[in-house]
Amino acid sequence: MSTNLRRMVWYAVVFVVLVAATFFFVFKDQDLGEVAHAVFTADILFIFLGVALMIGYFMVQAWNIMTLLNSFGEKVSFGKALKFSLIEFFFCSVTPGASGGQPLEIYYMTKEKIKGANATVAILIQTCGMQLAIMLLGTICLWLSPALISDNVLFLFVLGFIINGVALLVLLACLFSQTLARGVVNWFFDTLKGFGIKKAEVWKEGIGKSLEQYGQSAEYIKTHKKEFWIAMGKVLLQQSLFYLVPFCVYKAMGLSGATIWELFAIQSVLFVATSGLPIPGAVGVSETVFLALYAVAFGDELVSSAMLLNRGITFYLFVIVGLMVVFINIIRLKKAKEK
């Protein structure tokens, strides 16, 4: 077994252990029969609507990546961009602090003959937009609905806001600074090297030589501000689709009373509070904070079932899909190499 495959297996094992421990502690005092009944009697149409929103989430991201790469002269289809998005989601989900998502997405882009400098810029813009959307939506929702969260969650929100804010500042600086850009490229490929990918050092040197082209791409951003902000708007739409899923779960369980805004606002605050933590997929923390924030909307009897449905739709389902995409892509690339 290769080193990078062993590392993937290790991350997968840690992820599964975290998930198992989380669900053990969440459901150890629950009547599993009632939880199962609530899950399996949920309105399937609203469940499908929630899944459709998540599919839209990945499609918007793919649309953005495709548009950015094409604007740099790369010929990338929508299907290929969608594959990259799912690969990123999987590795973000199973690596601490989502550290493996973007480096491995760029790795697979370069395997598809996309220039590393262009891939790096596109992912930097996408990631920058994601950080901006998370902070903006979370701040607006907290400002308009401060009574929705407790003091304990407020601490996590502030911590998450600081972490995301620092990440955003670094990303913006990288987009317009050759020195920081070089540092980010080095970090990406050092991360790949840590996964046991032997050619990472060679690729890092090659991309280092092409940083002049990277500068041209960054200059493109400066001279195409409209296109840059359109890309930011797409990410804002993408994240909004994600935040609408809890409302679908709420309606699927036959509940009424809470507004779509309240459920949207809670999810945005929850995401800020958990997204910056160095835990694979924020497993354990996301589930716990969900139970704390959504208990008023769903009630104590249904909130555990609601959490299971919501995390199933927004996270676990697409971790499985992403894993399938990664393995299919590995097999396809291996066959292409043999030919």
Image (cartoon, grey):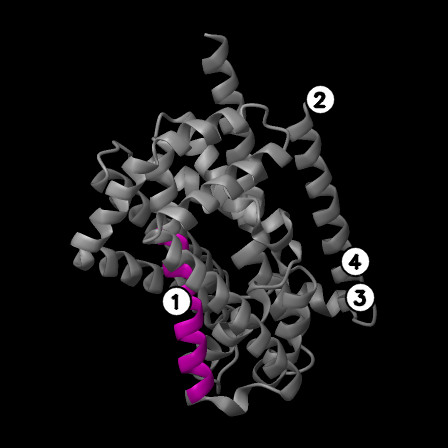
Judge depth for marks 4 and 1 and give the one in front: 1
The amino acid beneath tag 1 is Ala
Residue that extends furthest to the right in the rendered view of this protein: 29
Residue at 83%, 72% (x, y): give it: 29
Residue 89 on image: x %, y %: 51, 48
Disc on res. 1 = 2
Is 70 placed left or right of 96 in the picture?
A: left
Alpha carbons under labels 1 and 3: distance apart: 32 Å
Q: Which residue is mark 3?
A: 25
Q: Which residue is mark 1?
A: 133
Q: Badge 1: how crowded within 10 Å, few (<14), some, or many (20+)? A: many
Residue that extends furthest to the top in the rendered view of this protein: 339
Residue 189 on image: x %, y %: 52, 36
The amino acid beneath tag 2 is Met
Q: Earlier in the sequence, mark 2 or mark 3?
A: 2
Residue at 71%, 30% (x, y): give it: 6
Residue that extends furthest to the bottom in the rendered view of this protein: 147
Q: Badge 4: how crowded within 10 Å, few (<14), some, or many (20+)? A: few
Alpha carbons under labels 4 and 1: distance apart: 31 Å
Quadrant of image for the C terminus: top left
